Amino acid sequence: MDDFVRNKLVEWGLSELVEKFKDEQIDAESLRVLDDREIDNLIPKAGPRVKFKNNLKLLKEEQNSNQETVNSVQQCEQEHEEAADVVQVLPSTSDTGKRKSDVQSNPSRLQSPAKQQRLSMPGFEESIILSDVKNTMTFVHARLNDQDKLSAFLKKKISDLEIDKRELVGVFGKTGAGKSSLINAIIKEKNLLPSGSVNACTSVMTKVEANTRSSKYEAEIEFITKEEWKDELWSFRQFLDNNENQEKEDDDDYRDAVEKLSALYREEWKEKSSENLMENKYFKEIPEFLQSRRKILRCESANELSAKFVKYTRSDSKQEEGNEGKKWFWPLVKCVTVRVPNKPLLQHVTLVDLPGNGDCNKSRDQMWKGIVGDCSTVWIVTDINRAAAEKEAWEILESVSSLIGNGGECRQIHFICTKSDLLDDSDDLSRADIHDRIVIRNLQAKDGVRKEFNKRSKIKKHFTDDSFKVFTVSSKEFLKGKHLSPEETEITKLQGFLQELNDCHSETVNYVSGAYGILSLIQGANSGGVDDKKGEVCEELERNMILQLANINKKTEETYTAFEKCLDDGVEKSKGSYGEKLKSFLYHGKKGGAFHGVLKCVVENGGIHKPKNGTLINLNMKLASCLTDSIDEEFRKTFPNDSECGAFNGVIKTFTLNTDPLIEKYKNAELQLRFLKTEEKKIKAKLNRIIREQKKKVYSSLTETIENIMEEGYKKAAEFRGEGMLYCMRETIKNHVHSKKDMFEQAKNTMLEKLHSLMRDILETLEETMKESFELSFKTDGSSLPDVSTELDMVKKRYHQLADLLTR
C-alpha cells in the first residue's frame, strides 16, 4: 500500500479501510483497476462499499478528463506544427508570402475557434502542465519496485507531491447585510445563494467553491449526528420547561429554541417529548441523517440547485400558501458545500459564509473554529448606511480577532460596505448628481470605517493598518450598471483579489518542481557518474546543515526566553486581577434579574454562552486575558501571518544547504544536487505548514488550560436549582477560582511546553528529512532504478514552460 491510496481513503471518509487495503497490498496502480467482484470482497459492508465505488468512479472520470484534455492540447500542438511545416514549403509568390507572414505572426489562425478558446482560458495552460506532469509521475511510480530502500523512498516522495490546500475566505455579517448577493455577484451566479424572501439561520456554514470534477451544480450537505440532535432536543426541553414563567418575547435563547423546533417539527414539538421527536418518521425525507451520511444534490443550473438546498440552510420568512406544513432541515445541518462548474476564480479558493459566534452544538462549533482559524482572509460585510457605527459588525470582528490573528492564519481583513448605490431622496436628482453623491458617500464611508478601526485596540493587537482594507460595493449596480461603472462598484476589485489569491496558489509550482527534482535523482542515481566524489559531497552537505541547524536552534531559544519573560509578567497580573474580573462578570446583574439564566447557560456550557444575538460570553477567555495580552505582541512578531520573512524572524526561510555552489564544483553530481535543492524548498514549505498549524495550538493552550481547570467548578455550579440558585452559582465559581489560582502558572507552563515541542519538531524534521535525502542520493546503489531520461526531459521542459508562464 502507498500513501496515494491511504490519502484517498482518508479523503473519502473511509479511513477504517486503510489496514485492510494495506494487508491486500493495494497501491495506486491496482486501485485504478479494481473490479466490482474484488471491491465486494474487500468491503463486505454496503455503506462504505457504495461510498468507495462512487469515489473511485469520480477519480477515474477525473483522470480520464485530464488525459482527454492533455490529448486535445497535444493534438492542437501537432496540428500547429504540421500547418507550420506546410507553410514553410509554400511557393514564394506574393499571395503565399503574405499568407506565410500572417500565419507566422498569428499562429492561432491555424486553430479552430473552439481550440483558440480552450487555450486562452484562465489557468488552462497551467492545468495542462500539471495534468501532464501528474500522468508522467503516476507512470514512473508504477515502474518503481518495492525491493530496495531508495525505490521505496522515491515512491513515497512521488505520493507526497499530491498535497494541496485551498485558500479560505471567511465571510461574516448579520442577516440582511447582503452577503449572499455579494457572493453571487462576485462569482457571476445571480441565483445561486438564496436571499430576499428567506431568513438566514445563524448556525449553518455554507462553502462555495469550484466544481473541478463535473459540469453540474452540486451541494454536499453534512449533518450533525443523531446523538448530538438528541442532546439538543433534551437541552431545549429542559430550557423551555425551566423558563415557563419568564418573559419569552425578549429572550433570544427562548426564540432560538422555538425557531429550531418549529422549523423541523412545525407545531408538533409542543406536545411531544424529546424521545418522541427522535422517531424515524420525522426524518423520512433525509435518510442520510439517520445513516450518518452526507447528502449530495446535483443539478443542471444554479436556480434549480438553490431551490433544492435552501431548506438545508434557511427558513421562509413568509408562510405562503402551500408552505404551512413544509419542513426546514437546517437545525440538523453542520455545513453545506456548494460546488459551481466553470469557475477558474475558485479553483484554489473557497468562500465560506460563516455565523458570527460559532454554535452551542459542539461539533458545529469545532468545525466553525477550525474554519475560522484556517481563513487566510476575512470579509466583514455590513450595510453602508451605518458601516462605521454598525455595532454587530465590529463585535463580530472583535470576537474572532484572536481566532483569526495570533490563533489563526488570517493575513487580510476586508471590511465590505454593501448597497453603496442606495441613496435617500434621489428621485429628483440627475444621473450625474446621483453618481457624484454615491462616490462622495463611498469615500466618506471608507474614511469613517478606517477611523473606527484605529480605535479598536483589541483588533489592532493582531492586525496592522496594512492588513485592513475597506471596500464599498454594490452588487445591484455591478449587474445593472445604472449609475456606476463595474470598477466603481468595487466588485471587480474583490474579483481581482480572489484571482490573485488563486494564482498565488503553489500547487502546480510545488508539484512540477518536486517532480523535476525526483526524476533528477532517479536519473542521477542510475547513471552512477559521481561514485568517486560521493563522500566528499556528503561531507560538505553535512557541514552546511550543522551550521544552519545551529543558527535555527539559536533563534528558537531566543524566542523561548522572550515568551517565558512575557508569560511571567502575565501570571503576576492574572493573580492580581482575577478577583476583579470575577466580580465584574458574576455581578453583571446585581439584583439577579435575567442574569441567573445567562449564568446558568455559562456554567452548563463550560464557561461559554453563545447568544443568538449579542456578544459572545466567555469566562475562560476573561480569566486568561492577562496571559494572552502579555504575549500578543511577541507572538505576532514570532509567527506573523502577513510577513514574507516567515516564523522565528525568518530563520526557516534563510535555511539553505548551498547547493548552487556545489553544483558548480561537482558537475557530475548536478542531478542529485538539483533534487536536494527541490527537497530543500519542499521541506521549508512543509515546516511552514507545521508551524502554521501548531502555532494555533500553542496560542490557544492558554485559554484551553484555564477552561480545563475550571470545568469541575462549572459542573458543581450547574447542579443548583430553585431558590438561591444565583447566589450558589456565584459562590461556587468564586471558591473554585480561589482554590485553583495556580492555574495561571499551569497555563504558562503548558504553553511553553507546546512551544518547546514545536521548536524540537522543527529541528528534528529538518535534520532527519535532509539527512535521509542526501544519504539516499549519494550513499545508495541506484542500479535497480528505471531509465527516466525521456520523462526527465519532458518534465524539465514543462518546468521551464511553467516558469515562463508565471513571469508573463
Image (cartoon, helix red, strand yellow):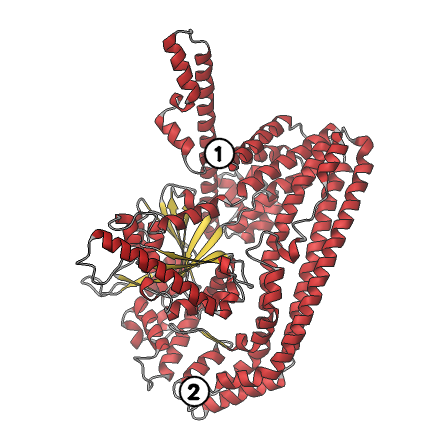
Q: Is residue 374 visible?
A: yes
Please name the amino acid that badge 2 sits on: Gly
Q: Please give left or right for residue 194 compared with residue 155 in the image.
A: left
On the image, numbered disc 1 is attached to which residue?
A: 128
Q: Quadrant of residue 574?
A: bottom right
x, y percentage for residue 807? 52, 36
Q: Is residue 203 above or below residue 576?
A: above
What mark, if any, has residue 589 been given in the picture? Answer: 2
x, y percentage for residue 654? 67, 49
Q: Please give left or right for residue 69 compared with residue 548 in the image.
A: left
Q: Please give left or right for residue 310 compared with residue 507 in the image.
A: left
Mark 2 to mark 1 CA distance (whole Å)? 64 Å
Which image quarter is the N terminus in? top right
Which badge, 2 or 1, comes first in the chain's sequence? 1
> Label 1's element?
helix
Taking the spot 42% from the left edge, 47% from the top edge, the residue there is 496
x, y percentage for residue 493? 39, 49
Instruction: Please state which of the two labelled residues, at mark 2 or mark 1, is closer to the viewer.
Output: 2
Q: Quadrant of residue 147?
A: top right
Q: Quadrant of residue 614?
A: bottom left
How many other residues sit within 10 Å of disc 1, few (<14), some (14-19) or many (≥20)? many
